[in-house]
Image (cartoon, helix red, strand yellow):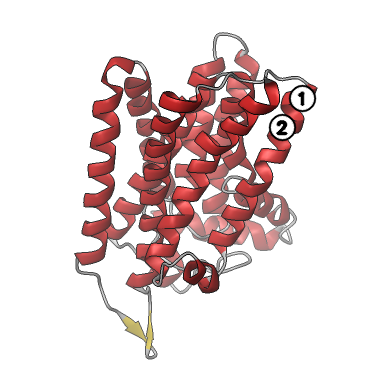
């Protein structure tokens, strides 16, 4: 049934001359790039607790996605059925669950929780964003409906888990310590578990080493979030800027290094890993994840505190 749905959508794309494909591609790309900045802007400008809630939701979901992908090791629809021709760039890596939905669902789902009483319209738009991103992955032929449905529910599960964590500040040290242990265990599991080694025309379908990078990056995100939160709580204790001109300017400036770190992660920058003294791709991706969260949760809030004093 999954494949038949994708084939129907593929026929629709072809029959309409791919008129919707550029927009759907943009929406899909935005869900894993520009949407990333929303939790940080909320954390810096609007509500520290609300932003932390979004960041924890995002971190849990990203880590869970990496673990699920290397556990299930499901191939992409185009590998399972050669009739499936993805629109645009052909993705690599495992298919289940969808990483795009597990970026979108925790952020937009978290925003629904934060805003549903103040603005039902905004909450509905966030819900629509979750649905559209999930649909976009099917429309482009890169994920099955099963991939996006499970990814969406897993992302919303992360929202629920984050709400439990943020609601119990008296147990925060326990949560922080447990998070570090879980990150270490997840990285070890990813590095040492067996992977399928299937070849087609002498080419490996999915390189396990490449898939490990995503999980190590996610472990770095969680580690950076945990360490950054502890540093901010104990030593920085900044106050949000408010959604005013100064706050917006500081948010834009603070987002530039975030974009650079994310852009660096997206490419092949072994020279940077070597400068950092990390000589493996896995270590480099882990460090990038740590830097990303440390900057957003602790370093830039320290600068905000100095600017606003």
User: 132 or 306, which is in the foreground?
Assistant: 306
Asked if labels 1 and 2 touch by Cβ distance under 8 angstroms, the answer is yes
- Position of 234 relative to 255 (above/below): above
The C terminus: image quadrant: top right
Q: CA distance from mark 2 to mark 1?
A: 6 Å
User: 87 or 226, which is in the foreground?
Assistant: 226
Label 2: how many Cα within 10 Å (few below 14, some 14–19, many 20+): many
Residue at the (30%, 52%) spot, across then down: 67
User: 173 or 305, which is in the foreground?
Assistant: 305
Locate residue 120, reporting x and y percent.
60, 14
Mark linked to residue 246: 1
Locate residue 207, reporting x and y percent.
37, 74
Locate residue 177, reporting x and y percent.
25, 35
User: 163 or 88, which is in the foreground?
Assistant: 163
Residue at the (72%, 37%) spot, across then down: 252
Residue at the (36%, 46%) spot, across then down: 63
- Position of 219 relative to 56 (above/below): below
- The residue singled out by tag 2 in the image is 250
- Position of 157 relative to 257 (above/below): above
For the question of whether residue 220 can be seen, the reply is yes
In this view, which residue lies farthest toward the right? 245
- Residue 124 in which image quadrant: top right
Mark linked to residue 255: none
Label 1: how many Cα within 10 Å (few below 14, some 14–19, many 20+): some
Locate residue 159, reporting x and y percent.
40, 28
- Residue 188 in which image quadrant: bottom left
- Horizontal side of 33 relative to 48 (left or right) equals right
| Label 1: which secondary element | helix
In this view, which residue lies farthest toward the bottom? 202
Residue at the (22%, 43%) spot, across then down: 181
For the question of whether residue 131 can be seen, the reply is no
């Amino acid at each position: 049934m999954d494949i038949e749905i994708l084939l129907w959508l593929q026929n629709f794309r072809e029959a309409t001359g791919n008129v919707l494909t550029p927009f759907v591609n943009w929406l899909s790309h935005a869900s894993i790039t520009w949407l990333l900045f929303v939790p940080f802007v909320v954390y810096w400008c609007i509500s520290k607790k609300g932003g932390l809630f979004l960041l924890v939701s995002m971190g849990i979901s990203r880590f869970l996605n990496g673990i699920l992908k290397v556990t299930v090791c499901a191939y992409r629809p185009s590998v399972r059925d050669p009739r499936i021709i993805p629109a645009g760039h052909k993705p690599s890596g495992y298919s289940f669950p969808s990483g795009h939905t597990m970026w979108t669902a925790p952020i937009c789902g978290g925003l629904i929780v934060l805003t549903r009483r103040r603005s039902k319209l905004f909450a509905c738009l966030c819900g629509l964003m979750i649905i559209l991103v999930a649909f976009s992955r099917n429309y482009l032929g890169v994920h099955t409906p099963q991939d996006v449905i499970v990814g969406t529910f897993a992302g919303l599960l992360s929202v629920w888990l984050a709400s439990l964590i943020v609601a119990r500040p008296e147990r925060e040290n326990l949560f922080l310590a447990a998070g570090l242990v879980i990150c270490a265990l997840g990285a070890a599991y990813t590095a040492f578990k067996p992977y399928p080694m299937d070849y087609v025309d002498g080419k490996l379908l999915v390189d396990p080493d490449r898939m490990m990078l995503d999980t190590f990056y996610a472990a770095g995100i969680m580690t950076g979030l945990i360490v950054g939160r502890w540093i901010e709580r104990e030593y920085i204790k900044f106050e949000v800027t408010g959604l005013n001109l100064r706050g917006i300017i500081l948010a834009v400036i603070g987002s530039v290094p975030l974009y650079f770190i994310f852009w660096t992660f997206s490419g092949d920058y072994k020279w940077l890993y070597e400068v950092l003294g990390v000589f493996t791709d896995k270590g480099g991706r882990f460090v990038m994840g740590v830097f990303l969260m440390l900057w957003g949760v602790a370093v830039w809030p320290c600068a905000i505190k100095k600017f606003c004093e």
